Image: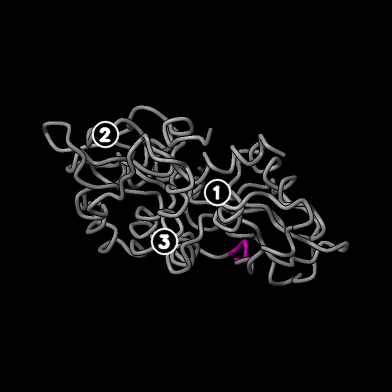
């Protein structure tokens, strides 16, 4: 019997009000370690969705004091996406996969007879595949993660999915024997195999896409802008003065949101 959306979804909704500041949204995303919040009205009805990528706009546009003041005055309602893409809990997972691919989104609001009951996200699907087989806010170096998930090009995609799930990462960097970056495999690259089944002969080299890199001395605004323009959640950190060296780490939307959520962050000051 084929699985339904309700078999994989996360029940319950993590929400915020339309008038929540971007700093408050950052705190909620960081506390719950999620990529998005459902924005609800005074009656608890979903009216939009705000993601960590939406917050990146606030971070990179706030490059000077005047623009920072403007961006800090924005609320969830200013940056949220509406309407929210939804899916019924009782439909097959394959139909939900079709929706994610067609709409090019990372999550869907799950409803039961029209009533919101949970969320199903790209990470849920990747976990399913795996089971089957601050200091300163100035630069990337200040908030980046030194750890990085890598694999060789010949790694089977099922093994990559298991590694992503175990590490809690949404992508894995593909390198050659000398550590040179070949590409990256993300959850979106693996989605078609959720729908059509995993072919054990398919390796990450067959499905990877180009990796985006950023210099460790680049500003957070530059990192956020690069993420927004390319719809990436993670950038590979390199040293432009030593381009052939092994990657230094990664910076993700979570890293920047966590910096925005700190008590001493400019986003938490009133």
The part of the chain drawn in magenta is: 213-217
Question: Dot 2 surroundings within 10 Å: few (below 14), some, or many (20 or more)?
Answer: some
Alpha carbon of mark 2 to alpha carbon of mark 1: how far?
35 Å
| Front: mark 3 or 1 | 3
- Residue 127's spot in the image, x, y percent? 59, 38
| Front: mark 2 or 1 | 2
Residue beneath disc 2: 116
Q: Which mark is residue 102?
A: 3
Are the residues tagged 3 and 1 within 8 Å (C-beta)? no
Q: Which mark is residue 35?
A: none
- Residue 207's spot in the image, x, y percent? 67, 63
Question: Dot 1 surroundings within 10 Å: few (below 14), some, or many (20 or more)?
Answer: many
* Direction from residue 125 to residue 263 in the image, left or right: left
Q: How many numbered discs sit on the rendered protein?
A: 3
Vertical side of 168 occupied by 67: above or below = below
Is 215 magenta? The answer is: yes
Residue beneath disc 1: 143
Are the residues tagged 2 and 1 within 8 Å (C-beta)? no
Identity of the residue drawn at 46% across and 62% down: 231
SS for dot 2? strand
């Amino acid at each position: 019997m084929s699985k339904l959306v309700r078999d994989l979804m996360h029940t319950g909704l993590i929400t915020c009000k339309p008038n929540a500041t971007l700093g408050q949204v950052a705190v909620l995303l960081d506390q719950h370690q999620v990529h998005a919040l459902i924005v609800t009205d005074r009656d608890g009805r979903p009216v939009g969705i705000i993601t960590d990528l939406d917050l990146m706009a606030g971070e990179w546009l706030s490059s000077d004091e005047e623009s920072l003041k403007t961006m800090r005055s924005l609320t969830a309602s200013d940056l949220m996406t509406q309407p929210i893409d939804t899916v019924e809990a009782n439909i097959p997972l394959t139909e939900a996969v079709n929706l994610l691919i067609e709409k090019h989104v990372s999550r869907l609001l799950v409803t039961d007879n029209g009533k919101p009951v949970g969320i199903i996200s790209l990470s849920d699907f990747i976990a399913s595949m795996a089971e089957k087989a601050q200091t300163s806010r100035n630069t990337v170096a200040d908030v980046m993660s030194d750890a990085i998930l890598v694999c060789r090009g010949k790694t089977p995609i099922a093994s990559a999915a298991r590694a992503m799930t175990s590490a809690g990462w949404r992508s894995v960097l593909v390198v050659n024997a000398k550590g040179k970056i070949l590409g990256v495999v993300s959850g979106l690259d693996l989605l078609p195999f959720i729908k059509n089944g995993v072919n054990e002969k398919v390796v990450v080299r067959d499905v990877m896409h180009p990796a985006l890199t950023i210099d460790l001395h680049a500003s957070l605004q530059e990192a956020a802008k690069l993420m927004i323009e390319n719809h990436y959640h993670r950038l590979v950190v390199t040293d432009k003065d030593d381009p052939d060296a092994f990657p230094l780490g990664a910076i993700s939307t979570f890293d920047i949101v966590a910096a925005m959520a700190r008590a001493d962050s400019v986003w938490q000051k009133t």
